[in-house]
Image: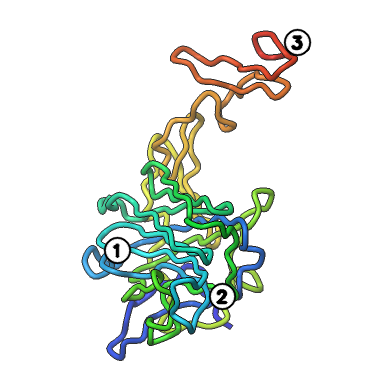
Amino acid sequence: AINISQPSFSGTDVFGYTSFLAYSTIPNITFYYEFHLKFQLANHDSALQDNLIFFTGQKGQGLHGDDFLVLGLRNGRVVYSYNLGSGMTTIISKPLDLTLNIHVIHLGRCLQKGWLKVDDQKNKTVTSPGRLVGLNVFSQFYLGGYREYTPELLPEGSRFTNSFQGCIFDVQVRTSMNQEFKSPGTPEGHPNSGRSVGQCKDSPCSLIKCRNGGKCIESGSTVYCDCLTGWKGAFCTETVSICEPEHDPPHLCKQGGTCVPLPDGYTCHCPLGTTGTYCEQG
């Protein structure tokens, strides 16, 4: 069995084969998914050119209509693409801040709408073309590289030239908003196979700089910044709005009232049939 909690990927070897880990197929990914992960680059040159982070999809045809989901790095930016069978759609981040030792990615999709958030950059959204709304993939979930030597057999739009170079931490996925995030694999966190992968030598908390009093927490393969009250985000650099659930104290809007922030506080927009400062009457 392969027991690697924080894998280190070496890239593409002299024979052209990529390092990778393969996990069992992620179930129930058809209509909704969210992924969280963190990574450390081995360098700021070849690791940022055209490098796969993860892939799952229909393989062996190389057709334009093949369903797939792929995440990678290209020209110093994070690239997230998917195809539901009626055309590919792509979100590209702003250039990575290379002064950061570890980068954080949140991405997801609900039916045709996808989103990507990298580090403390603003969230980006996109809508896929056509009418199809389901992602039909049955392959394993590949992290860091492909098993195949011939990327031409992979769906158009999902082909990255090189394997990831560096360490990947804390890969988490859920396929429903009501689920908790879990590591891929069966049993959880355990890959089925791999090639040229080692254990990352650096402790993630030695690399992450949590800001504004936040504290780095490392538990197994999970790493995150525990932010002080009033702060959020990958590195505790984003302020919590008074209307957000994380705000302490929470807003007082009742009975389905919508909290709307104001320069000096907030107001409650009340649903039909309710009234009062906090929609408490009715």
- What residue sits 52% from the left and 23% below the top? 242
- Which residue corresponds to mark 3? 281
User: Seen in the image, is 98 located left or right of residue 10?
Assistant: left
Q: Secondary structure at mark 1?
A: strand
Q: Position of residue 51 (x, y in %)?
A: 33, 70
Label 2 vs 1, first from the N-terminus: 2
Look at the numbered discs 2 and 1 and tell me whether their residues touch, using CB distance below 8 Å: no
Q: Tag 1: residue type?
A: Arg
Q: Tag 2: residue type?
A: Tyr
- The quadrant in which residue 132 appears is bottom right
Crowd around label 1: few <14 · some 14–19 · many ≥20 (10 Å): some
130 relative to 13, above or below: above
Label 3 vs 2, first from the N-terminus: 2
Q: Position of residue 13 (x, y in %)?
A: 31, 85
- What residue sits 49% from the left and 52% below the top? 114
Q: Tag 3: residue type?
A: Gln
Specify the farthest residue to the left: 45
Instruction: Please state which of residues 106 and 62 is positioned toward the viewer in this rendering.
Output: 62
Cα–Cα span, label 1 and label 3:
55 Å
- What residue sits 39% from the left and 69% below the top? 157
- Which residue corresponds to mark 1? 74
Q: Of the residues tagged 3 and 2, which is closer to the observer?
A: 3
- The quadrant in which residue 272 appears is top right
- Which residue corresponds to mark 2? 23
Q: Secondary structure at mark 3?
A: loop
Instruction: Please state which of residues 79 and 63 is positioned toward the viewer in this rendering.
Output: 63
Q: Secondary structure at mark 2?
A: strand
Look at the numbered discs 1 and 3 and tell me whether their residues touch, using CB distance below 8 Å: no
Cα–Cα span, label 2 and label 1:
24 Å
Q: Of the residues tagged 2 and 1, which is closer to the observer?
A: 1
Label 1 vs 3, first from the N-terminus: 1
In which quadrant will I find the C terminus? top right
